[in-house]
Image (cartoon, rainbow, N blue to C red):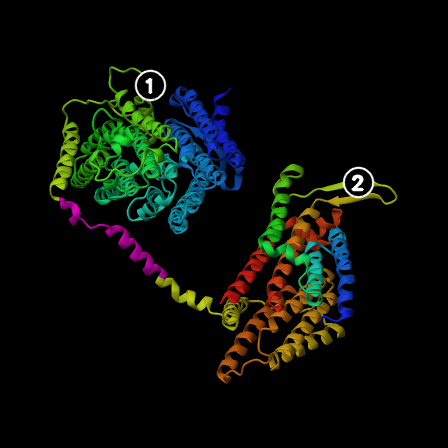
Amino acid sequence: MSPELLLIAVPGLLGVATVMAVPLGAWLGARAGYPLAVLSAACGAVLFVLLDEALDSPVTVSGQWLPTLAAEWGLRLDALGLTFALVITLVGAVVLAYSPGYLHGEMAPARYYGALTGFAAAMTLLVLAGDALVLYVGWELTTLTSYLLIAAAPGGRPAAARALLITFTGGLALLAALLLAAASLDALSLATLTDPSAWTGAPVVAFLALLVLAAAVKSVQAPFHVWLPPAMVAPTPVSAYLHAAAMVTAGLYLLLRFAGLLATQPVIAGVVAGMGAVTALFAAAVAVRRDDFKQVLAYSTISQLGFMVALVGVGTKAAIAGALAYFLAHATYKAALFLCAGVFDHSLETRKLPELAGSARRLPLNTAAVVVACVSMAGVPPALGWVGKDEGIKGLLEKPDVFQWLVLVTVVAALALTVAYSIRVAVAPFAKSSDAAGSSEELSQRPIWSMSLWAALLATVSIGLGLVTAKFIPFLHITPLIDAATEVALGQAPDKPLVVFPGFTAAFFTSVGTILAGAAVYALWRARGWWQVLPADLGTRLADGLGHRLVALGSAPQRLWSAPRPALHLGILFVVVASVAGAGLISLSEGPEAVAGESAPRWVVALLIGAGALVVARAHDRLAAFAALGAVGFLVATWYVLHGAPQLAAVQLVIDALTIGLGMFVLRHLPRTFPQRRPLRRTGAAAAALAGGLAFAGLSLFQRTDALPAASEHYLDEARSSSTQNVVTEVLSHYRALDTLGETTVIAIAAVGVVAVIRMGRQR
Amino acid sequence: MSTLISRVAARVITPLAVALGVFLWLRGHFALGGGFLAGGAIGVAVVFRHVTIGADSIERLLDRGVGHVVGAGLLLMIAYGFAGYVWGKGFMASATLHLEAPLVGDVAIPSTLLFELGVSVVVIGAAVAVIHELGDDQE
């Protein structure tokens, strides 16, 4: 098969898996994870087949999509996308294989697997996109599927809504950035957008600022990180996949993709570096204090994403290579730790670190997986976590200036805290348990061993990938991949390949220093418990406070709009329409065309309509007013007939009849007569109504010309030449079909709204 | 309103209104008619039926939620839109099927009938849902 076909096959297979997941989940239940895992692994295998080709030169396919937007549907496989796609498909396969053991009534398997594989397909599309618009589609689809996965968990709705709201803001920023690019470059292919020379004279700073905002939201940089910790209510495999390996790294991918462009704008790059460093330190400080295993992991993820984002901001060759290596390390060890947390959760019914005491004996394999993963998280040689950290620190040391030093110090402090909580997590299962509760029978009810095995596999990979960078193991080298990905991101390959032991350099000593400092912090905590002084949830509290402020700000207009007073809403509507239309009418230099004399029947009907309207306005009795209103409706239908518009007249008749019928039911609930209002209010209402009516009358004067506009003539000609004789339906169902669909949707929404309002009223 | 005459009238009017609706729907492409009008006509009949006979089987269809009928109508319209890729040049493209029928000769069946049907279903669904909710508390 040609490489292009294989490339299409990767998101294609995952798309097929998404479609199949729902019936499979209904048929096989939780066990549907196994065939889906095989599919996902097959996608990974396809990527391996394409590896050599992609490292050589990008594999691309594309075709026309939206020519007016210069958008193509296109896929592009280069080393950077490949690095991410490998993680997505392979970690995805492990997570899918782990899920059957985990799922026990938390979620319907069909929904769980459908959303999970849908997410995998969307994420793969995101990293393999050759066109920015394809990337955007993948980006938003990951947001949606992530919402489905969080919301389906028990009590997950509020967390899911928060995640959706915050990440959609980022999505809007991305969309704005892309529209800006499309408008100023007239191109949307990623190859053009990432090329700094294409941007000369274009608003590159605004583009990058929007892009960084989108990436910061997706990759949980402070202060946008607030959606991640509550999202931990999601099933643990979902957290392992979305909140460690895949979704949250989408922002990192975006920044890496544009790293070359970012490097040309030192100010924005500095903002990125600073934001990443602050996030890394703040989140590490929070992670140290948490007791819940998943919360520790959530804050640790925020912290490590901060580290990687800071490296991209610094943007030297070694920093980018370090970020890429650390991304691979993080995806494997963090997913492994989440999977381990799931095993603890299911077998011990707790995730609190102090309560894991004694589980080392009862869950030996799981504990081993935790320890191995923590070795990589702490960045101890020879794990890949060490290689990435060491290379990253080398990158930070490459550009010595004051700002760079600040970033370095912050990051080093964050890494030391990372070591501290890694030790804390690793030793938690070994603590002596105070009671011997929990029988072994309970444990055997789930396939705990196989679940732990998948976690152990990922943890081992995280160590093994570091080992293979050592010179004496010439097998499955990741170094060429990282080098090529760095070249894609930055335009230049690193000077030296990644190695476990780079020699006694400043970076080496700094990295070792983080491990020693972390161990010291941990020892001090055991001795004194001194980090209790650190604020517990300062960030979350600040963000929540800000959120409450925002809600309060919005509640004033909300009170106005949600007031149960139709007169108020109509009044606002009329005044707005009258002012807009009035301003437009006044600014016109010419008046409407004079229309030749009206016929007598038209005059009669017009006078009757006016009289009817007057009766409606003057009536005290609601029923009388309503009857008069119905009569006006029928008269308007007559008016249409006199103007030669039978289709409009018929629709008006039907709608009038429906309105009268439904209105009668409303009238039954209202007092017979209108309440007496103060004269001032009556005058105000009359003024608003008159202004609205006059505005519409004024507008209609301009519609009444004897000569048809060109567009209408065109419609008529088209209709005459086709089989149709009814121009109105032809326009509605043919030329403006999309508009009709939109308007019909409005009817549907209105019906749902009316039903909801009535039910709400009845419940009160 | 619930007199004997009106109840009998409602029983006669409902099938007539449905027939009128179908008639309006089918001829919308060639003369006065169309999906919206058809839906409106049937909607009026349902309201009249509700007033005279009370909530009946038509409305009970909706007890499970407005979404089902209204949503089905919208989905039909969207499906028609995508079908445009099959028989036409793109989204919402239409086509006409010409059939040779005995006695009448050439009969043109425009694909937009599906689209119009969707509009009718939404309008009927909306009317029935609202009347069902408004009239619910009278029993």
Apparent side of residue A498 relative to residue A150 in the rendered image (left or right): left
For numbered disc 1, what is the local secondary structure? loop
Q: Position of residue A332 (x, y in %)?
A: 32, 30
Magenta span covers which residues? A529-551
Q: Nearer the viewer, residue A454 or A511?
A: A454
Label 2 environment density (alpha carbons within 10 Å; few <14, some 14–19, many ≥20) = few
Determine which residue is flagged by label 2. B99
Marks 1 and 2 belong to one chain:
no
* In the rendered image, the vertical position of residue A42 relative to residue A155, given as above or below: above
Label 1 environment density (alpha carbons within 10 Å; few <14, some 14–19, many ≥20) = few
| Residue type highlighted by circle 2 | Leu
Chain for disc number 1: A
Outermost residue, right side: B103
Outermost residue, bottom side: A679
Q: Nearer the viewer, residue A34 or A179?
A: A34
What's the residue at 43%, 38% (across, down)? A104
| Residue type highlighted by circle 1 | Leu
Q: Which mark is residue A74?
A: none
Determine which residue is flagged by label 1. A476
Q: Position of residue A252 (x, y in %)?
A: 33, 37
Chain for disc number 2: B
Apparent side of residue B91 relative to residue A364 in the rendered image (left or right): right
Q: Nearer the viewer, residue A732 or A331?
A: A331
* In the rendered image, the vertical position of residue B121 relative to residue A350, given as above or below: below
What's the residue at 77%, 55% (across, down)? B19
Name which quarter of the figure residue A433 lies in.
top left
